Amino acid sequence: MRQFPLEMHHVAPGRVVEWRLRSTAAEADGRGEGAGRRASFNQDKHFTVAEESRAADDPVASWLAVTFEVAGALDEPALARALLTFVQRHEVLRCAFRRLAGELACEPFAPGELALDAEHVGTFDTSERLRGFLVERFTRSIDTLSWPLFVMGAVLREDSATVYLAFDHIVCDGMSMPVVVQEVMTAYEALCRGEEIEVQAAPSYLDFAEEQRRRYLSIDADDERLDYWKSFMGPEEEFFPRFPLDLGVEPGRMYPIVNEASLLLDPGEAEVFEKTCLSVGGKPFMGVLASVAVCLREAGGPGVYRGLMPVSERGRDTWADSVGWFVNTMPIEFDASPGRDFGQVMAGVRAGFGEMIAHIDVPFVRAWELLAPEDFAARSWPYPVNFFSYIDMRKCRGAERHDEWRPATHVWSARANGACSWFQRDAEGLHMNSLYVDTAAARRTMGGFQEALRQMVREVTLSGGFGRPIALTAPRRPARTPLDVAAFARRG
């Protein structure tokens, strides 16, 4: 399971069916089962940006989606039941968000008040037309200010089907996508075997949000739990670490994005890379981050890496099977200056990561609001920000069945003012997905960076270290077309 643009996905053509969620309670009196639940810090900021953008006639748009495969002729009633059970199980998916007296309230509908209506959308005779429909469908349908906050459907063929779900970020995160696949497919397969399934509520993200607010809503800028953030900001008092390379952006302006993905290491290379990282006391994500830092430095960035890193707040047990936005974003800093070998930079990453984890308790949005109130009032981050994310998909729920289900994650955003890169390790190797501003400078910079990073991680794989300097000039840009992932989409 990996993340790449939906436009790169080869989904075989077929007949499209969607299931629309509705609430019988809303039809009766416009209310859910209860008010009074408050949104999380992440949700509140996300919803506020959507409100302000709508008011300024400058709407933001983004979505997260997951696709996966079903072998054999699809049992439509069974899939509909599995989808409904999935929604009923996760309280955050049953929530309508409303601004009440300045606060963002979550109003969940009771599981028994939800129903699905099937709609036959149409038949698509080519993969290109189908992809175009899905991209437009997700973009037009996902609206932070309107319930429901996701769409569900399937592409049916005689001997197979592709299931898709697309969500607004307010109800889920990237680690929720494997949960979606595992739960829907497990329920579907059980129903196809003639078994009965019961709705068992998962631990609710709303409970997580409530506990988070109870602990951190009352803190102020002088709270000692913010000392790590203050130390990171330094005398310049910049809350956001700047992306150190030129992207050609103007202050205060948002741009259309480039969304591209590529393979960094094949399965065998990724295995060797992991062993190399372990041999110097690190983990694979630390090796990738060390390589990113050295590539940025050799391209003209500073010797000290400073960036933001999303970290899961699910823990090992309580929230592992829950859908929600269980992500904190934290700053990390370490030395990647010239002359330091792979082991030394990895030691810096390991120390920096340990320090970050020791201070992970304060929510990013709360720290942002208290320490950078002027930036917090804006609808976007103030300038291009250095951002790194890594997930080992082999450790996710249901990973042992991914070879059969062939799930993939897709992220889209209408506009940005910087660059974000996500790295995923799966059975197919190490992959990179980047979203960045569509400017001539950014295309040159990111093209060179991606090629240099590919060379860097392969150099680590071959020699056990960084080896010779990697130039970021005149990059070799690999072709990126839907055919790049066609074999992944059809294998099996």
Image (cartoon, rainbow, N blue to C red):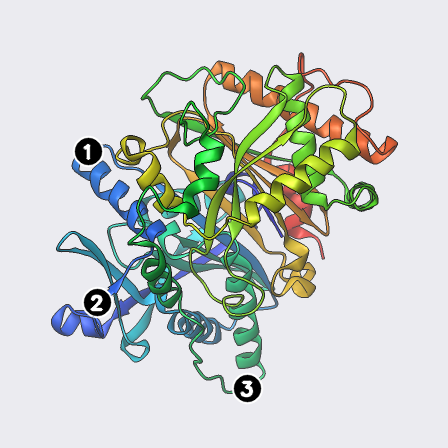
> Would you call the spot at circle 3 few (<14 residues within 10 Å), some (14-19), or many (20 or more)?
few
Q: Tell whether 455 sits left or right of 192.
A: right
> Residue 15, position in %: x, y?
46, 57
* 1 vs 3, front mark: 1
Amino acid type at image mark 1:
Asp
Q: Quadrant of residue 100?
A: bottom left
CA gap between label 1 and label 3 equals 51 Å
> Residue 412, position in %: x, y?
44, 40
Residue drawn at (40%, 53%) of the image: 167
> Residue 424, position in %: x, y?
63, 45
Residue denoted by label 2: 36
Looking at the picture, tell me which residue is in the foreground, 314 or 154.
Answer: 314
Residue denoted by label 3: 194
Residue denoted by label 1: 57
Amino acid type at image mark 3:
Gly
Q: Quadrant of residue 160?
A: bottom right
* 2 vs 3, front mark: 2
